[in-house]
Amino acid sequence: MTIRVYTHVDCYGHQPGSGHPESPQRLAVVLETLKAPEFKELEWREAPLGTRAQVEMIHESDYVDIISEAAPLHGLVPLDGGDTVMSPGSWSAVMRCVGAACAAVDDVMLGEARAVFCATRPCGHHAEPDRAMGFCIFNQAAIAAAHASRAYELDRVAVVDFDVHHGNGTQAAFSPLRGMYYASCHQSPLYPGTGHPREHGAHHNILNVPLPPECPSAVFRRRITEQMLPVLREWAPQLIVISAGFDAHRDDPLATMNLDDSDFHWITEQLAAIAGETAQGRIVSILEGGYSPGGLSGGSAAHLRALMGRPQPLN
């Protein structure tokens, strides 16, 4: 069945400044990669603008006011004391992120696509209901899950996050909510310092699998197999949303994991298998972090191959 990709030129308009790791070039690398002949069967769609009502499914109204009023006519406005900023094009960019995430949910729920990848930026999983942080302004993965729950009356929606940094924003949003599940594997210790295994959520709906610095492929796969996949199967999600960060790649400058492209293919295959068992195969994947051009290119290619049901080439 169809695999779609949502993106929009407005996502280049978020300009956090020269030398900032979360640069527009990240998106350019991913899009160039997915335009290769091997991905010619992908269906491309233009990301619509999200709505305030969609954003407020996760974020507080006062916070949305602050963000909507913060975009400057020129220059940068800091949102969290430094590395998370608004530029003149940021509002349109983040609203395209939200619109893509919700449209992707609609596509898989209505049977128009089996899986959808949102090639959008900035990333979102650090954004909490009432604050921006860690390069993230609105939490589009959490919003996608909330949209699925409300619009399609799903009882069990899971966000699975393999970004190298813990998605504190998704955890904060989901912790009090019945029927919304969050599973994260992440390097620890590392920013933002959250994601302890003892953090379970109000309804035992949070699972954290910390991984050590310099974590090799074998340890990553063993811990995911033993600690995450059985719990995810037990949750039996009716939709899986993936926070797809590729910064656990060995070449990434912001972390010290030792994964390679094949690991991103492997974990995507595992999640697709569970989606096939419990969610009629439905997956919405949303680009999160990844700050090495090689890691972003190779990781996103491997991720899409797995979503398409194709093998990963041997290195």
Image (cartoon, rainbow, N blue to C red):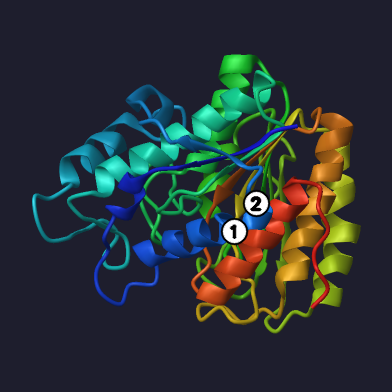
Between 90 and 171, the one lying in front of the other is 90
> Would you name the residue on which mark 2 appears?
39
Q: Which mark is residue 186?
A: none
- Kind of residue indicated by mark 2: Phe
Task: Classify residue 282 by image quadrant.
Answer: top right
Relative to residue 67, is residue 210 drawn left or right? right
* Quadrant in which the C terminus appears: bottom right
Q: Position of residue 178 (x, y in %)?
A: 67, 28
Q: Position of residue 114 (x, y in %)?
A: 72, 32
Residue 5, above or below 213: above
Residue 88, above or below 177: below
Looking at the image, which residue sits at the far front?
37
- In three-dimensional space, the C-alpha distance between marks 2 and 1, rounded to whole angstroms, equals 6 Å
- Kind of residue indicated by mark 1: Ala
Name the secondary structure under disc 1. Answer: loop
Relative to residue 282, is residue 105 drawn left or right? left
Q: Residues within 10 Å of mark 2 (few under 14, many from 20)?
A: some
Relative to residue 59, is residue 257 drawn left or right? right
At x 61%, y 75%, the residue is 189
At x 72%, y 40%, the residue is 205
Task: Classify residue 312 by image quadrant.
Answer: bottom right
* Quadrant in which the N terminus appears: top right
At x 63%, y 16%, the residue is 152
Q: Position of residue 273 (x, y in %)?
A: 86, 43
> Would you name the residue on which mark 1 appears?
36
Between 186 and 248, the one lying in front of the other is 248
Relative to residue 69, is residue 138 drawn left or right? right
Name the secondary structure under disc 2. Answer: helix
Between 66 and 44, the one lying in front of the other is 44
Q: Is residue 292 visible?
A: no
